[in-house]
Amino acid sequence: MNPLIPAPPTKEPPASTAARVFAVRGLSKTYGDGEAAVHALAGVDLDLFAGELIVLLGPSGSGKSTLLNLLGGLDAPSGGTLRYCDWDLGGADEQGLTLYRREAVGFVFQAYNLIPSLTARENVGLIAELSADPMSPEDALHLVGLGARLDHFPAQLSGGEQQRVAIARAIAKRPRVLLCDEPTGALDVRTGVLVLEAIERINRELGTLTAIITHNAVMAGMADRVFSLSDGRVVHTQVNAKRAPASGLEW
């Protein structure tokens, strides 16, 4: 099976027998040269598995965004190995990375990046049209609780609803990996919880490996595993025996 094409969804819980999606060994990323060089990542080792929900936790400058960008094929590592399934993602050319981003990865950013002149249905449909085996925009929007807002424009939606449209857009192509960069950063607590509930539901129902980066330690409770980063390294790994529901989070 082509590793760039998402695998069939699985609802099995993460376990040692789950398929390994990422194998990361000694991963490093340096920006610049000489005395001006910035070592954003300095030797990260981790394995991520199908169906997991993980949180990458740390302050600004800890390396969590850099790690997410490398996992998403948005940037190339300076050293170490980064394997996606059986494919050397770290050594891929731009054509391979483009296919990988298009077929295997869904991105959710703090900014919603919706097209103002298109409805929720149409915003999601843009991505679905580019995918090999997409779900319908209607199904994707129902999955994030927006089945009644299909034909509303972004200006007619709240910030939390716009973020959920962005999530629906990201998962409409049935990605194997969902990468969320501070998805609640611009939202109040109540609205942020609704967004996290949508992410939680997608992880549970579609079996998508889901990674959330945040500086908010409260979100650690909803994860299977939490990787705390500092100075470009994973300094602590926390395994939660039981995930806390997003609905119970407060910050």
Image: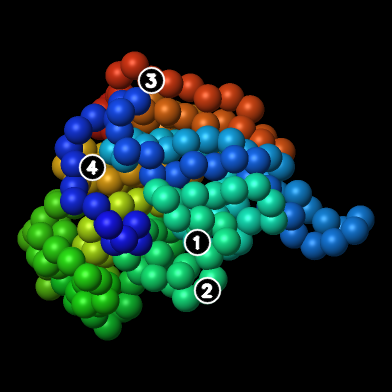
Query: From the viewer's perspective, is residue 180 above or below residue 190?
Result: below
Q: Which mark is residue 246?
A: none
Q: Which residue is mark 3?
A: 240
| C-alpha distance separating marks 3 and 1 | 28 Å
10 Å crowding of disc 2: few (<14), some (14-19), many (20+): few
Give the mark, 1 or 2, whose residue is nearer the N terminus: 1
Q: What residue would you read off at disc 1?
A: 73
Q: Nearer the viewer, mark 1 or mark 2?
A: 2
Q: On the image, numbered disc 4 is attached to which residue?
A: 207
Q: Are marks 4 and 1 in contact (CB under 8 Å)?
A: no
Mark 3 or 4: in front is 4
Q: Position of residue 163 (x, y in %)?
A: 32, 58
Residue underneath mark 2: 94
Image quarter where the C terminus lies is top left
Q: Position of residue 220 (x, y in %)?
A: 43, 29
Q: Amino acid at mark 2?
A: Glu
Q: What amino acid is found at the position of numbered circle 1 in the picture?
A: Gly
Which of the marked residues, 3 or 1, is nearer the chain's N terminus?
Answer: 1
